[in-house]
Image (cartoon, rainbow, N blue to C red):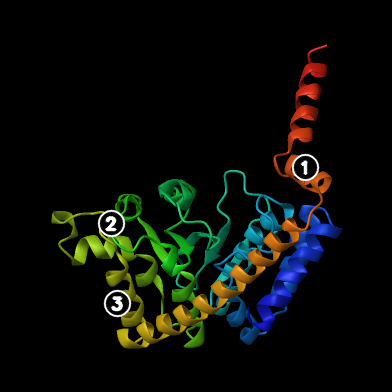
Amino acid sequence: MNHDFELFVISINDLSKNNTFPIATNLLTEQVSKLSKESLINIVQEIGTIPESIEASSTEEKLYSKASDVILSRCFVELGLKSKAVSERGNSADIIAESIHGYTLVADAKTFRMSRTAKNQKDFKISTLSNWRGMEHDFALLVSPYFQYPSTNSQIYSSSLDNSVCLLSWEHILFLLVNDIVENDSLSLEQIWNAPKRIERDSKIAYADRQNCLFPYINKFVCDRISKKIQDFEKLLQSCKIAIAKRGNCEIQHIDAEINIIKGFSREKAVSELIKSRKLEERISSIKSFIKSLE
């Protein structure tokens, strides 16, 4: 982890332990709004990967997920849009942004653990994003780690086309940020967000396998829009691969350390931790509460 991201994770852990979730979210949003662009870029480089130090299904993980929304919203601000991360989801998109060119978009930020290998269409919520766009907004975007998208065929890609949801990655957002791209009177990023319709219009995709990976098209659209060569983006992807591999080794070290701690448990401690991990006592409590509610 780079220093800015490490501090960001520490802050998420502290906020989740010492505050209610709404208060923690507000404090986190305030912190992100004060980040320098350099610190923001450093966090964007890492945010797509959930640290193994954050326990699965914990309050910290829930706040980390919200943090990714807040970070992506701040990225849109850096790109020249008005943007906000919605505190209470309900039937609303996680992120809403508005351009000086008159269009609006909804977006969803996705993060995954490196240890999470099985991902399917429902993990990306593409149809949900399409519903959130509805009649009110012009575009819908999904932002996930580049190398966590399927590299070959997947229903995710046909769903993107069918629902007109633009698939982007944190690496695409990073590419825009490091190149100091900002919307102005002469530059609109609308052509990037409109990638699904452009792909169908500008290619023979309708006559091919619609489940083919769409990133060769999307990468070109991003580079063309900001007048960069595809080799520039590929160079960034290569540097990201190196950083991901380095991060992965750190995550392995963390898991190895946990294994060694568990190996040192007494029998009583091991039994206690197993009961806790399976939430057996909480399940008993829930059943008792349900029975009591019937009285």
Label 2, residues with CA under 10 Å away: few <14, some 14-19, many ≥20: some
- x, y percent for residue 3: 68, 83
* Amino acid, disc 2: Asn
> Whole-percent x and y of residue 138?
42, 58
**Earlier sequence position, callout 1 versus callout 2:** 2
Residue 272 rendering spot, x and y as whole percentages: 80, 43
Residue 68, how many percent across, how many down? 61, 64
What is the spatial separation of the Cα atoms under label 1 and label 2, in whole angstroms? 44 Å
- Left/right placement of residue 36 relative to residue 273 reads left
Residue at image location 77% in from the left, 54% down from the top: 22
Q: Amino acid at mark 1?
A: Val
Q: Which mark is residue 220?
A: 3
Q: CA distance from mark 1 to mark 3?
A: 54 Å
* Residue linked to disc 1: 271
The dot on residue 286 is none
Q: Name the residue at 72% across, 78% down.
A: 34
**Between marks 2 and 3, how big is the CA–CA gap?**
19 Å
Nearest to the eye among marks 2 and 3: give it.
Answer: 2
Q: What residue does disc 2 label? A: 153
Q: Is residue 51 left or right of residue 126?
A: right
Q: In which quarter of the view is residue 78 placed?
A: bottom right
Helix, strand or loop at label 3? It is helix
Closest to the observer, 272 or 282: 272
Type of the residue with mark 3: Lys
Q: Quadrant of the N terminus?
A: bottom right
Closer to the chain start, of discs 1 and 3, is 3
Q: Is residue 229 visible?
A: no
Observer-side mark, 1 or 3, equals 1
The residue carrying pointer 1 sits among few (fewer than 14), some (14 to 19) or many (20 or more) residues within 10 Å by Cα, namely few
